[in-house]
Structure formats: C-alpha cells, structure tokens
Image (cartoon, coloured by chain):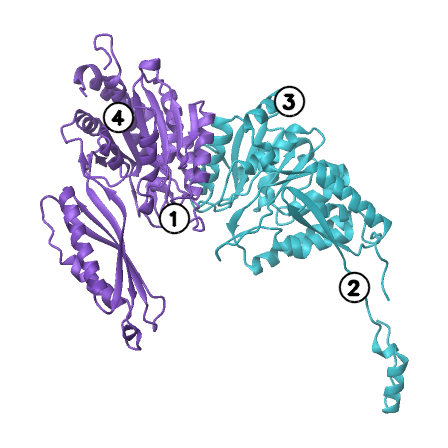
Amino acid sequence: MEISQETHLDPVLASLPEWRESLKDLREMVLANTVMCGEIPSPTFEEENLVRFLCNRFTEAGLSSISTDEIGNAVAILPGSEGERSRNLLIVAHVDKIWETTDDHTVTVGAETLTGRGIADNALGAAVLITLPAILEHLGISLNSNLILLGATRSFGKGDLGGLRFFLENSQHHFDAALCLEGMQLERLSYSCLGMRRGEITIDLKSPAARHPGSAGAIAPLNHLVDKILAIERPERPLTEIRLGSVQAGSAYNVAPRSASLRFEVRSESGEIVAGITEQIEEIVDEISAGHEASADLQIIATREPGDIGFSHPLVKSTRTIMETLAIEPALDPSMSELAALLDRGIPALTTGLTRGENRHTSRETIEIAPLFSGLAQLVGVLVLLDKTLSPSPTTPDE
Amino acid sequence: MSKSAITPADRGHTTKIDKWLARNTFHHGEFWDLRKLVEEKEHKNLRISLCIPTLNEEKTIGKEIIIFKSELMDRYPLVDEIAVIDSGSTDKTQEIAASYGADVFFSGDILPSQGFKRGKGENLWKAIHQLEGDIICYVDADIKNIHPRFVTGLVAPLIHSDTMHYVKAFYDRPIAYSNELRPSGGGRVTEILVRPLFSLFFPELTALVQPLSGEYAVRREVLEQLPFPIGYGVETSHILDVYRHWGLDAFGQTDLDKRVHRNQTTRDLGKMSFGILQSFLNRVESYGMVDRLPEMSNLFRQFQAEGNRYQQTLKEIVEEERPPMATIPEYIEKMKKAGREVVPVTI
C-alpha cells in the first residue's frame, strides 16, 4: 500500500476542517441513531433487535446486499463507482454490549454529553456505521471502492469475536483494508493487537473435610490459585501482563462457598509468552486438582494471536497525520478487539475512536458531543484516503 | 334489595364501544411506513406542529428533541415545527431544547394581553396561538424511552381519517421494572378515579383506555373551540367537551406500547385527583346535569388487550344497602325487653 502525500493525502488534509464543520449539520441524526442504538438492549449472543434496527437503517439508506448471516451479523454494501473493479473497504462496529437485557438502557441527553449503559461501547460505533452513508452523501463524497458495513455480533467475552470471524471466513469478498469503529477514546489509534488467552477457572470443593464448619470453603483454594498465578514471572519486554478480571464465590456472610471461579486474561506482545504463561496456569490448576481439598478446571474461552501492521505502515502514518491536522494527539494502544481477527487474516486494519468519554462499562458511561465531529472528520479522512490509495488508476494496472 | 340489573342502555353502550374499539383503536405498528404517511400528509396539504410543554425537564428534553427532529423532520418531513412551550424552568431545559434546534418559547411571552398562569394547560392553550399546524401533537417532556412512535402513532389516524379529531395515546403492556421506573399501564388515577366516574356518568368514554395520558394529537378546529383548565384537569375536561360536542366517533386512540417515566408519589396523585374532580364536577354543572343526573349504570368497564385486539371487561357492581337497625322490628323488640326504647331518626 503506497500513499502518495502530494496526490492523495494533501487534498484530504485540506478538506478536514471543512468536513468537520459541515458534519455538524448531521448532529441530530448521529445523536438520534446513537440514542436508539444505546436504548436497544444487545447482550452478547442476543443482538437480534439491534441488528434488525441496523438493517432497517441500511434499507432506508438505499444500500445493497443487506442481510443478516447465520451468526446474526448485519451486513450491507454501499457500492463503489468502479463496478467490478472496485476494491472493498470493510467498516466494522461490534453491536453487542456488556449489559443484560434487564438493565436500564435509558440514555440521557445533556447539553454536551450523552450518558447511558453502552453508549460508548459500542452504541456510538454502531450509530456511526449506519449514519456513514448519509455522512458521505452530505459531504458530497462518492467512493470508488465498495464500502462494506458490518455490524458484528458476538464480540465480547465468550463471543470471542465470533461474528467477525464467521464473516471473514465465509464472505465471498476480498477485503483490501478495514476500519474498526469504537465509541471512545478519540485519541485511540490501534494498529496492533496483543496475543491473548482469556480463561475461566472453576474451583469445586471435593473433600468432605473441607466442608466442615469453620472451613474457608472454596475461597481458600481460590486464594492459593491467585497467589500462584501472580507469582508467575512476566517479562517487562515484550510487554506482558496477567489481568485478573473477576472472582465469584459465595453469597452470604456465614456460609462457606463450595465453588469459586476466577476470570483472567494473559496478554503479551509475544504469542509464545502467552502460550508459556497459559501452560503454567494449567499446571497450577492441575496441582490444585491433585490435592485433596478441591478440583479445579480451566476453560480457555477466547484466543488472540499478536498482530501488527507496523508503526510505519502508510495507513498508520497517514492516519496519524490526519489526527494531528485535527488537533488529535494519537494514543497508540494495542487492541484486543475486532482488529485481532482482521490482522489474523492479513487485512491492513486500524481501530479508531470517535469521541471522548468516561466511565466506560458503568451505568454512567458518558460520551462528549463536541469532539465527535473531529472523530467523524477523521473517519471520513481515512476512508477517502484509503479509497484513493486502493483505487485502480489508468496508469497502475489492477492487481 | 338489589338495584336494577343490566339495562338496555348498558347494552347499547357496550355495542357502541365494541364497534368503536374495532374502528378507532390502533397500534402504532400499523403506521410504520413513514414515507407513505408523509406522502398522505402532503397530499392532504396538512401542517403538523409538535408541542412539548415543559417545566424543569433538563434530563429528558434533549433526547426528545434529538429523536423527533432527526426522525420526523430531517429524515421524514412529517412534522413541520417542534416547539417547547416552557412555564419558566429554572434548570437548563430551555437552553438544551434550543441547542438541539427546537423553537423555545416562554409561555408568558405568548399572548401577553391574556396574562400568564403557571400550569401545563396554559402552555397547551398558548401553543394554539403560537404554532402554525393544522394538527397539533402534544407530547409530555418526561418520557424516558422516547421514540418517534409517540408522534407518528397519534398523528397518523388524523392524517388518514377526516372524521377523527382527537387521538389519545395509551400504554398497555405492564412489565416488571425497577422501583424507580414503572410503565403507565392504565394509570392509578385513571383506574381509581376517572374510570369509575366515566362508568357511572359517561359510559361510552370508558372506551378510552388511558384518558389522562399527556400525549394526544388534535385538529386545530377542535382545539380552538375548547376551554383549557390550567392544571390537572385539562385532559379530563377536553374529553368531556369533545365528547359532548363531537361525539365518541371524534376520538381515536393508539397503543404506543411502553412509556417509562418517573413514578409519582401518592401525595402527588392525590393533588392530581383533586384537580380532575374539580374539572369533572364543573363540567357536570355546566352541562346542567347536577339535578338531572342520568340513571347510574351498575356496569364497571375495564379493558384488556389480546395481541392488538382490545376488549371490554364488564363487571356488574351493585352497591346494595341495609336499612338502619333501628327500623328492624326484631331489634326494636329486643331493645324494648332490655328496657330501652329505640326510635328511628330521619337521615
């Protein structure tokens, strides 16, 4: 992928301030879509209602090939102007949220913010996905490439990027590049992903003696397990960490629990290190099971291989320049989300944020409205740039 | 001693209500095709105004304006103007509404020659003067789950039917909610006060599932003829006045599914009931019914929904009475034997 600064990037950079200003005309449309995407419950594996909403919006926008697949993804195509020669740009926003259907999904709209469960992760991403055709039309932009819009299901937890993986495995299209949309943070620029194993260890008491009054129940072996895991040696380079995300045990003050569980992630820039640490955790689990007190079971529920298109990749470099032109200081964070599945398949891809926000994954998750227009201008800039770069030109024969 | 059973008049009301329910009761899902609705509106050359009366609604007003403006003005030009008529909010209601593109008016600035009274009815009344629409749709500002259906479901019957003049919302599907939020259902004041009153004195009006709902769309020709109580009684008096002048067939009602809003305290509902009762009795007096009350019906009418079909449920409630014990011979005799003479008094 070559990006010529003079022929492609400069005109995009020059247009950014005007686009940012002009996109404010669509404020109510973007925010209304965000509110509606936010208020439709969409827990992982139960995304049907939000997917139906996305498909309705795709239909209203006059897109082609609107469909849902066996795994529930919402897909539509905004055809490019090059007909069969058009390249394919994939835009992905995951549509599942971490919240249950019974949680209150009400969104509150203030003068400068939107607040509600899942509003940043990822109601805003889904909303921008469905508003994108209107955004391009409003700016008078017609792409040479096909724009394939994907509302991906089964992203979180046990979903393990199932929606996007299924789509990539089964799609008839070759994707020349991809962008992943996340609600926040605006400064986010992810071009690499860490290797990762996400697992859950369940501990069950097996010894009758361990159940006697005064026993600490399953909490003691769980504590032992945690100590052992934290004692595993982790190198500073390549960057490696073990995240203990959740423990569950018991429900009362005075009853020792018979079972306990721990959810964790091992992350590293090195796939080998991830595999090595995971093996050590398996040994710890086996060791606990070999004792008299408790049995332990490890389930790996999600896997990522490390991937990277490189800091100096033309797409990354140009995106940084676009962000800097919009006075956005890029924060180069590795991603654990959709980007991993794309890089796995060798598709040049980025994840960008759309606005600033706070209280992620809480009931007070909040996004700011004003920075959103910079995020949208950035998205349009990267899209147009990709389109120009990938388009077959008369002097460059199509590959 | 039982009072009269079900009368021919009762049966007549039941038949009329059944027919009206079948013809004039809708579900918002029937009006999903906004493109078609806009075409019909334009064909009939109608203008539609949306009025949101407010007093300190900063938490919900922004979302209402965004949703209505995006969906019903920008995407589908069904609504020609969105106006917030405010009673003098001290929070950011006016600022937020204006920032998202609504026309914001302080009620006191409209028709200054008529003075300013603080109350929702005042805002609704002044909207008739301020707004331009042939149809005015009123939507309360405290709805947390706002959606375009809150407007489309109400204006669509008026666009499609020239004989309907006043379309009310109702919300029917009670489901479990947290303590803070609850669906309206029939509404406590409706079920405890208004429905019994209507069942007794205006049985046909019991066909309105939720007569007190704050969302309704009305033709200008009707609105301009109605007096407006300023406070809680505005919906009740509207219904009585429209019924008296235009009859039951002027009404329509649309099921808008769930409405989520802040729960009101029993104390507040008491105040509301007091205002409604005032309006009701004022109407009974002005209609000359005080010394000419109609025969009271024993039928109490409620409603149930089965899918999108709405049915009356009739319950005959006869309040039988026993006479004072002082008129019963056995009791008088017993007391006499005990050395005490009992004489009935006239009450």
Q: Distance between the residues labelled 3 and 1?
A: 45 Å
Q: Which amino acid does label 1 sit on?
A: Trp
Q: Residue furthest front?
A: A290
* Count of marks placed on residues: 4
2 vs 3, front mark = 2
Tell me: residue B302, above or below residue B166.
below
For chain A, give the colour.
Answer: purple
Classify the position of the N terminus of chain B by image quarter: bottom right
Asked if marks 2 and 3 touch (Cβ < 8 Å), the reply is: no
* SS at mark 4 in the image: strand
Q: Which amino acid does label 3 sit on?
A: Lys
Chain letter of the residue beneath label 1 in the structure image: A
Which residue position holds label 3?
A: B44
* SS at mark 1 in the image: loop
Classify the position of the C terminus of chain B by image quarter: bottom right
Q: What residue type is labelled 2?
A: Glu
Q: Where is residue B331 in the image (x, y as percent from the top left)?
A: 86, 82
Q: Which mark is residue B319?
A: 2
Chain letter of the residue beneath label 3 in the structure image: B
Q: Where is residue A372 in the image (x, y as percent from the top left)?
A: 32, 34
For chain B, give the colour.
Answer: cyan
3 vs 4, front mark = 4
Q: Which amino acid does label 4 sit on?
A: Ala
